[in-house]
Image: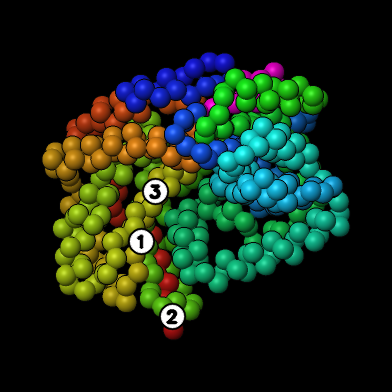
């Protein structure tokens, strides 16, 4: 195994790439009793157009298949089912689908080796029938209706749909009822066989364990299985107009307090920054402008316009960065006007900039106190950077106020999409 040193934090992550192509990352922490294990495929909701393995032409499949597969992987042909298996040792299992990946996971204090073997086995052994696929459609349709009744979910979905035009990030991860109805067993098999190959997946184990012992368990599990030859997966490259799709929309649905989002759409083609640095600069700038320590926050609370701090949401859609200022208030027009005026003074002092950098460095160090947090960091590194970032502190330390100000010049504060959600 390779030992990756996280500089300035003096932590280590063990790494090995198996013959199957599966990448394994192990982080050990002696003063914890909990183990957190994730098994991830680099396949999320945005990958609906791709070249299937052993084929030459690109195909388009219905939206929502990544999430649908998450459901079906959990349904095994023979008992015990995953929930039952992990519960026997007091472990908890779950899964989630994002735009970029699908992750299967469990928390355990006991029987770590047995649980890892089972996790690898059930994810790498899907069972599909025509009947089970049709039955699952009803379950996912109910889930869609449940989300449609949640005001916050509706707001967030509308923000992306109105800001973006053709970018697949505009679509719901779970998709629509009509999308789900059009999914076939063959579609699911095609996507599973393409994206669930071990060379497109990685396993992360964080907790209190012997890394040499655990890597041997994983090696033996994979050596018993036969996989097709590793091949590169080709997905469609997409383009996106710089202008927002819809400048403003008001949605009427049952909600206690109106919810509102003010979203900026920033093109990435002219920004020569790494993904991580861009996010760090955006986080520093917009939390300085709107968080609980800002004059904006204090003024609007004193004036009774808001009662809670404005939430900042950053979404990198590969072509553009969406920055949303989200809050709930019956005086939403005043809130929107105050946000607009604050953005006209898009600036930051050197003192605020340095203060935010110190907070980010502190957060990076404290992240290693939690095996769940460091597992999430590893997943994020692999999905978006393709490798472990071994010097995160240095990246933060090298941020400069001059580079920040150059970024500010490229933010078009007039390229805005507003969403208001309110009762009748």
Residue 2 visible, this angle: yes
Q: Residue at x 25, y 45 (%)?
A: 285
Q: Residues within 10 Å of mark 1 (few under 14, many from 20)?
A: many
Q: Is residue 379 magenta?
A: no
- Say whether residue 236 is left or right of residue 294: right
Q: Secondary structure at mark 1?
A: strand
Q: Residue at x 34, y 37 (%)?
A: 366
- Say whether residue 352 is left or right of residue 63: left
Q: Which residue is mark 3?
A: 314
Number of numbered markers:
3
Marks 1,3: beta carbons within 8 A:
no
Q: Specify which label sits upstream in the sequence, 2 or 3.
A: 3
- Answer with the quarter of the image where residue 89 lies: top right
The relative height of residue 100 versus residue 290 in the rendered view (above or below) is above
- Say whether residue 90 is left or right of residue 268: right
Image spot of residue 39 (x, y percent):
62, 37
């Amino acid at each position: 195994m390779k030992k990756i040193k996280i500089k300035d934090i003096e932590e280590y992550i063990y790494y090995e790439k198996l013959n199957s192509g599966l990448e394994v990352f192990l982080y050990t922490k002696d003063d914890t009793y909990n183990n957190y294990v994730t098994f991830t495929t680099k396949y999320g909701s945005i990958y609906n157009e791709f070249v299937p393995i052993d084929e030459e032409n690109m195909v388009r499949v219905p939206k929502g298949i990544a999430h649908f597969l998450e459901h079906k992987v959990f349904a095994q042909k023979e008992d015990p089912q995953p929930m039952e298996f992990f519960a026997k040792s007091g472990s908890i299992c779950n899964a989630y689908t994002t735009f970029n990946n699908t992750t299967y996971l469990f928390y355990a204090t006991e029987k770590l080796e047995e649980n890892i073997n089972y996790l690898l086995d059930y994810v790498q052994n899907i069972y599909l029938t025509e009947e089970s696929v049709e039955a699952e459609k009803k379950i996912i349709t109910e889930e869609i209706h449940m989300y449609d009744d949640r005001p916050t979910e509706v707001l967030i979905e509308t923000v992306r749909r109105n800001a973006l035009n053709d970018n697949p990030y505009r679509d719901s991860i779970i998709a629509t009822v009509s999308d789900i109805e059009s999914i076939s067993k063959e579609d699911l098999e095609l996507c599973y066989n393409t994206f669930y190959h071990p060379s497109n997946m990685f396993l992360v184990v964080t907790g209190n364990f012997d890394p040499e012992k655990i890597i041997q368990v994983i090696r033996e599990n994979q050596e018993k299985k036969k996989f097709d030859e590793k091949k590169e997966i080709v997905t469609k490259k997409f383009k996106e107009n710089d202008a927002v799709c819809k400048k403003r929309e008001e949605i009427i649905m049952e909600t206690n307090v109106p919810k509102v989002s003010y979203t900026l759409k920033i093109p990435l083609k002219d920004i020569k920054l790494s993904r991580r640095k861009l996010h760090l600069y955006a986080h520093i700038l917009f939390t300085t402008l709107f968080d609980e320590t800002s004059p904006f926050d204090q003024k609007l609370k004193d004036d009774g316009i808001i009662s809670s701090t404005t939430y900042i949401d950053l979404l990198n859609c590969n072509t553009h960065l969406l920055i949303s200022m989200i809050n709930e208030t019956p005086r939403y027009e005043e809130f929107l006007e105050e946000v607009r005026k604050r953005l006209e003074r898009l600036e930051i002092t050197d003192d605020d900039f340095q203060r935010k950098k110190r907070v980010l460095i502190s957060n990076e160090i404290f992240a290693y106190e939690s095996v769940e947090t460091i597992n999430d960091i590893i997943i994020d590194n692999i999905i978006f950077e393709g490798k472990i970032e071994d010097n995160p502190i240095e990246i933060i330390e090298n941020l400069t106020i001059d580079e920040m100000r150059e970024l500010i010049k490229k933010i078009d504060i007039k390229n805005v999409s507003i969403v208001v959600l309110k009762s009748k």
